[in-house]
Image (tube, helix red, strand yellow):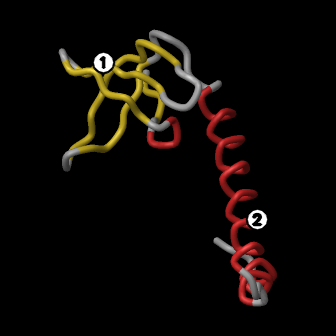
Amino acid sequence: MLSELFKSEVKQMKTVEEVHEAWDFLKLKHRTIQAGLVLNFDVGDGVSFFSRGMTQVGKVTKVNQKTVSVLVGTTRWKCSPNSLKKVE
């Protein structure tokens, strides 16, 4: 949830440059968080995620800088780490 202070600051922006600066900051923050989430997974971990109307369950085959490769049956998925949950 966005804080009221953040919403207020955004509403007060008057120029495109201010919006671009805020956008660049948010993108950097997003990348930093994503990079930290990737570190939670190792090759061989069992994971689940929701796609195509159902829960998919598979094994981590590769941990990339921004994504995690997951093998579900014979299909390889490239997943955002925030969409994955570890399973036993």
- For the C terminus, give its image quadrant: top left
Name the mark on residue 71: 1
Q: Nearer the viewer, mark 2 or mark 1?
A: 2
Residue 70 horizontal/vertical position (percent): 36, 22
Q: Residues within 10 Å of mark 2 (few under 14, many from 20)?
A: few
Q: Position of residue 13 (x, y in %)?
A: 76, 84
* Residue 36 drawn above or below residue 82: above
**Dot 2: what SS?**
helix
Residue 10's image quarter?
bottom right
Residue 62 picture location, percent across and down: 46, 14
Query: Circle 1: is it few (<14), some (14-19), or many (20+) Cα within 10 Å?
Result: some
In screen coordinates, is 65 left or right of 3?
A: left
Give the image quarter of residue 75: top left
Q: Could you tell which of marks 2 and 1 lies nearer the N-terminus?
A: 2
* Residue 48, quarter of picture: top left
Most foreground residue, 50 or 34:
34
Q: Is residue 1 above or below residue 24?
A: below
Q: Which mark is residue 21?
A: 2
Residue 80 position in % (x across, y down): 47, 38
Residue type (three-letter) at the residue carrying disc 1:
Leu
Task: Describe the element under mark 1 as helix, strand or loop.
Answer: strand
Amino acid on which the number 2 mark rests in the picture = Glu
Q: Which image quadrant: the N terminus?
A: bottom right
Q: Residue at horizontal 72%, vertical 48%?
A: 28
Q: In the figure, 8 relative to 65: above or below? A: below
Residue drawn where x is 46% and y is 35% of the image: 85
